[in-house]
Amino acid sequence: MPYYGPRYQSYQRRLFAAQWNIDDIRSGPLQVTLARTEKEIKWAKELRYKVFVKEMGARPSRKILKFRQDSDEFDEYCDHLLVIDRSVARKNPVVGTYRLLRRSRAMEIGRFYSEGEFDMSPILKIRGELLELGRSCVHAHYRNRSTMQLLWRGIGAYVRHYDIKLLFGCASFPGADPEEHAAHLSYLYNNHLATPEIRTSALPGQYVKMNTVSPELLDSSKLAATLPPLIKGYIRIGAMIGDGAVVDYAYNTTDVCIILKTELITDKYAQRYSPNAECSDAE
């Protein structure tokens, strides 16, 4: 089994004592929580393995293959947001997860995960707490609006609790060929490019130009409707995009940098993703 050192165990005890009211976020048998035990984090990693490796074709390391858990050195420093189905009897009841890394925790490891793909310096200049979102995935049988709303209600509670000023992270198109997503990438560049003061850019040597299709050739309505669900969700709540995409060959994805000022979330979605909101599959 993976080893969890004393620092990790101490952190988990502190986390357990600071659960606040996030466990009150429910919809039927589904409950939002933060992982507070090694077993619960193991469940999240197993779901990530099932989605990223088995479904999406990521190329796992020997360690990941051995334990059948998607993991890296950042996991120890992150909070793991979970949606758990309390009605099922299977060994792993986690049906959705997000990995959350605050700046105050990232300082302990020395960087954010996104800094491996993007120049984050414009964001890092912002004062206050920042939150990196990552490793988002949902079990195939639960990929509906209700599950994603639960995850976002959990994120909303987390943002308020820690007074997060800005959210960011890598979001992905499937596959490692950016040309397959040329129209979507051009749409994002022309319609949702971040303002200069917070605009990240793909690192030299990894930079893939996004604006390759003339704007007059883009069917914006169709492209907006056919974005990958996670990116579409980000855009709907006011997210912006950094400059340049990055091909992540290990995970078989084409990544963009998502940037979201919490103050820019529209009133409609701020209400939808509040802890007391009701979940629905309706638009």
Image (tube, rainbow, N blue to C red):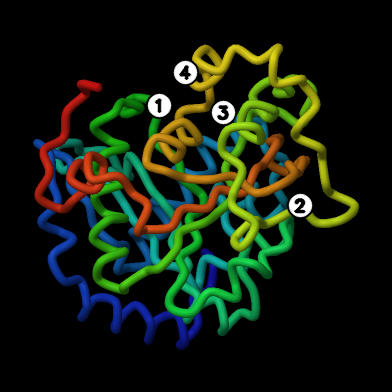
Q: Type of residue at label 4?
A: Ala
Q: Which residue is mark 1?
A: 140
**Picture coordinates of residue 177 (x, y %)?**
79, 27
Name which quarter of the figure residue 172 lies in.
top right
Q: As shown in the figure, which amino acid type bears the numbered disc 1?
A: Ala
Q: Quadrant of the C terminus?
A: top left
Q: Which residue is mark 2?
A: 202
Q: Is residue 230 left or right of residue 248?
A: left
Which of label 3 and label 4 is nearer to you?
Answer: 4
Provide residue 115's location: percent of width, then percent of height: 69, 64
Q: Residue at x 39, y 35 (%)?
A: 236
Q: Is residue 40 above or below residue 108?
A: above
Could you tell which of marks 2 and 1 lies nearer the N-terminus? 1
Q: Are marks 3 and 4 in contact (CB under 8 Å)?
A: no
Label drawn at residue 55: 3
Q: Crowdedness of circle 4 by 10 Å Cα count: few (<14), some, many (20+)? A: few
Label 3 environment density (alpha carbons within 10 Å; few <14, some 14–19, many ≥20): few
Report the residue marked by disc 4. 225
How many numbered discs sit on the rendered protein? 4
